[in-house]
Image (cartoon, coloured by chain):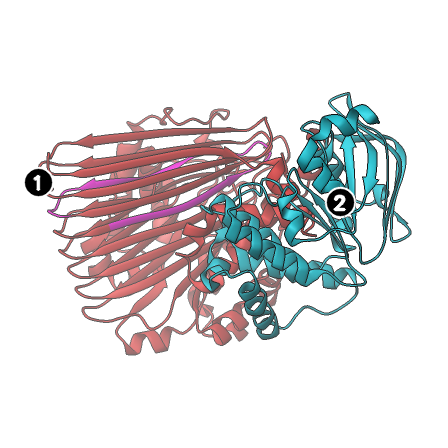
């Protein structure tokens, strides 16, 4: 699904990723943990193709294709979705309108006809229920006046509608209360499947109680310094990053 | 990714999509302006004496006036003697004698022009149930659905025709909202106005369809001076749509229109505009100067006038559609989207003059600036001592795209009645890279992303437009801002 090889990237001339290697197979859930400033968010932005995040060397292949050669919107249409840490507000643009435009952009990319409005509404309703969101959310401006938790739910709703092959969740759990965390986790778990992969970036192990990862990686100073199974997350929770960082 | 400045420059360099000239024989007066020219125009149009005298007195007044210079716009001085003040398609005899009774009689080339503009007159008129009084250059050449309207006693015709057929109505209302000496350009218009539209909706009648006029400036180097007068009698309702687009050319073209609206007791007039005149090339050369006076008077109690405008074209826009709220409980509304790209200059806004008791006004202004455009909102809210309980709400938002454009806000508030409530809110924002990236990450193209953000910004105004017009306005915005990402 995703293969990152010796990835180096910088922001404003400052190296952040320094030789990162990561392989995510089909159907796998990977958690990336690490101290502040280790490059977790940078990794997400680089994979999504954000301007200003310069890849200086290394390669990323996504389903056998050169991901870094694709424009950000093409990466999205190919099935890479980033659930943002801080989703932006787009005032006046209805949620449902964005969802439909995004859904159709993907379909067009695959050479499929535009979705029937009625069918799409059915799909939306069903997904909205999974996220325990009121339907009125669909008719509000994108993230406009949403609370932090509502914004995160909205990200996962978009993910459920767009059904990405690879979902990158950038600290989706931050700012969520325990109930919201459960709902968001349920959403992610709904998406899990043989042909879909998830990369979770998180500070806390509590998210991993709900979305159980197949692999846990520790990112420090732009490189993955340790990988393991879910027990690694528990170890980190108990002992902090320091020990792992020093051991590496 | 294409959010860099150079990319903006590249994408902003688009050509005006409606740039072409229709080859129709023109009858045009030589350039110049004096009383003789005005007498000739009046004679060409077979006007009664009162009309001619009205023009002449306006002209004499105009000669004592000087061009206003307070607006936040700059342009080389205009030479009013180098402008031709009258131009008619084909010959006067043909127009007088063979004014088309139906679309079949309209010059096919003219219809072709409309097609190029995406305004299929026949389809629009028949399928959409819209009566179109098409002003091509200075003379109206097609009026549809007249019969159906006349069943209701509604008059919808060219201004010239109204002067001929309904002189008593024209005389009664003309210049009562915008007096001939109102301002420099309104005076000029009063002296030389070529044609325009006249609408009269009698007492208690609700106009059964949207009335629509498409303006078009087509004669080279010809100033165009439209005159529109809309009267809604007691309890009447009318919605009027005005949309424009113009061919590409080199000379600056002055356009100084006057629109007057009169709403008697309990009447309501909705006036919607989509303006897309040639904005000039990337340096602003050759674009239209749009110096327009639009004003409505809520003359009767409980009357309402709403202006909705989408201003996308012209090199310079100088325009303040206003409401004089004379009647008690009368309501004035102004919803505006003004978008400028390249070197466009916009100084636009509204005036709400509260005179009657419990009068209310709402101003929603959305300014979008891209390229090197300058966009100024200038608005006056004036509450006179007679306007007990008057209320105004003003919201003025500016959106900037790129770092070479400008947004300016000049609100003037004069309140002379202590019970009045006046609120003003203003915001300025930039289309954020983070907003665009968010939408790209959802698979939208950059252009779609910008259009979506801009449409969202303008939503409160678009929702006031009649349905088909809203679609057109959205498309127009997309064309105007094609790629202008900052």
Pointer 2 chain: A
Compare residues B91 and B223 and report the one nearer the observer.
B223
Count how many numbered circles sit on residues in the image.
2
Verify whether residue B410 appears in magenta: no
Pointer 1 chain: B
Please tell me whether residue B321 is drawn above or below residue B164 in the rendered image: above
Instruction: Give the residue at x 82% y 34%.
Output: A224
Identify the residue under disc 1: B386
Secondary structure of the residue carrying tag 2 is helix
Q: Which chain is painted in red?
A: B
Compare residues B233 and B449 and report the one nearer the observer.
B449
Position of residue A89 in the picture relative to residue A38 (left or right): left
Identify the residue under disc 2: A231
Identify the hue of chain A. cyan
Position of residue A72 in the picture relative to residue B165 (left or right): right
Residue extent of the magenta highlight: B332-358
Please tell me whether residue B320 is drawn above or below residue B296 in the rendered image: above
């Amino acid at each position: 699904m995703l293969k990152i090889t010796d990835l180096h990237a910088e922001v404003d001339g400052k190296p952040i990723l320094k030789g990162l290697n990561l392989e995510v197979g089909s159907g796998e859930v990977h958690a990336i943990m690490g101290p502040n400033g280790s490059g977790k968010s940078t990794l997400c932005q680089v994979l999504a193709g954000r301007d200003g995040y310069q890849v200086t060397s290394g390669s990323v292949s996504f389903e056998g294709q050169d991901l870094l050669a694709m424009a950000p919107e093409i990466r999205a249409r190919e099935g890479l979705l980033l659930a943002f840490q801080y989703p932006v507000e787009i005032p006046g643009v209805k949620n449902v309108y964005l969802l439909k435009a995004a859904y159709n952009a993907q379909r067009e990319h695959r050479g499929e006809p535009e979705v029937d409005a009625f069918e799409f509404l059915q799909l939306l309703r069903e997904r909205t229920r999974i996220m325990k969101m009121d339907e009125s959310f669909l008719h509000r401006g994108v993230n406009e006046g949403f609370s932090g938790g509502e914004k995160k739910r909205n990200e996962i709703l978009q993910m459920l509608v767009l059904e990405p092959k690879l979902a990158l969740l950038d600290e989706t759990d931050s700012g969520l209360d325990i109930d919201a965390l459960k709902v968001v986790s349920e959403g992610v778990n709904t998406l899990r499947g043989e042909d879909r992969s998830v990369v979770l970036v998180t500070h806390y192990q509590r998210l991993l109680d709900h979305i159980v990862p197949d692999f846990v990686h520790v990112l420090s100073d732009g490189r993955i310094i340790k990988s393991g199974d879910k027990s690694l997350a528990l170890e980190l929770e108990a002992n902090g990053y320091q020990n792992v960082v020093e051991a590496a | 990714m294409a959010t860099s400045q150079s990319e903006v420059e590249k994408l902003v360099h688009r050509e005006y999509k409606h740039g072409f000239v229709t080859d129709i024989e023109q009858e045009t007066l030589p350039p110049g302006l004096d009383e003789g020219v005005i007498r000739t125009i009046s004679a060409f149009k077979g006007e009664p004496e009162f009309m001619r005298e009205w023009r002449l007195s306006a002209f004499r007044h105009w000669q004592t006036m000087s061009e206003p210079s307070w607006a936040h716009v700059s342009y080389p001085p205009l030479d009013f003697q180098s402008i031709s003040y009258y131009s008619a398609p084909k010959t006067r005899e043909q127009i007088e004698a063979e004014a088309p009774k139906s679309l079949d009689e309209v010059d096919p080339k003219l219809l072709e022009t409309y097609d190029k503009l995406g305004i299929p007159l026949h389809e629009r008129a028949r399928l959409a149930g819209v009566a179109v009084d098409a002003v091509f250059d200075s003379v109206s050449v097609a009026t549809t659905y007249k019969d159906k309207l006349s069943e209701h006693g509604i008059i919808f015709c060219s201004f010239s025709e109204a002067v001929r057929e309904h002189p008593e109505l024209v005389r009664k209302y003309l210049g009562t909202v915008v007096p001939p000496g109102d301002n420099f350009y309104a005076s000029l218009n009063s002296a030389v106005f070529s044609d325009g539209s006249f609408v009269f909706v009698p007492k208690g009648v609700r106009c059964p369809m949207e009335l629509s006029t498409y303006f078009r400036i087509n004669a080279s180097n010809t100033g165009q001076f439209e005159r529109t007068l809309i009267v809604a009698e007691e309890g009447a309702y009318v919605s009027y749509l005005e949309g424009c687009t113009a061919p590409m050319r080199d000379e600056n073209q002055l356009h100084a229109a006057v629109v007057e609206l009169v709403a008697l007791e309990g009447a309501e007039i909705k006036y919607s505009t989509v303006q897309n005149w040639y904005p000039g090339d990337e340096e602003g050369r050759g674009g239209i100067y749009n110096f327009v006076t639009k004003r409505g008077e809520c003359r009767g109690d409980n009357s309402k006038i709403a202006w909705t405008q989408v201003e996308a074209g012209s090199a310079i826009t100088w325009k303040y559609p206003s409401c004089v709220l004379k009647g008690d409980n009368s309501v004035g509304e102004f919803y505006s989207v003004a978008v400028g790209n390249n070197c466009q200059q916009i100084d636009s806004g509204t005036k709400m003059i509260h005179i009657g008791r419990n009068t209310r006004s709402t101003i929603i202004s959305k300014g979008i600036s891209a390229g090197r455009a300058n966009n100024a909102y200038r608005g006056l809210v004036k509450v006179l001592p007679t306007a007990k309980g008057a209320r105004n709400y003003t919201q003025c938002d500016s959106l900037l795209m790129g770092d070479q454009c400008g947004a300016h806000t000049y609100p003037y508030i004069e309140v002379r009645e202590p019970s009045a409530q006046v609120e003003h809110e203003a915001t300025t924002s930039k289309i954020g890279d983070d907003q665009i990236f968010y939408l790209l990450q959802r698979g939208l193209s950059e252009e779609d992303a910008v259009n979506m953000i801009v449409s969202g910004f303008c939503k409160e105004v678009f929702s006031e437009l009649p349905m088909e017009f809203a679609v057109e306005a959205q498309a127009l915005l997309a064309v105007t801002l094609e790629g202008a990402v900052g």
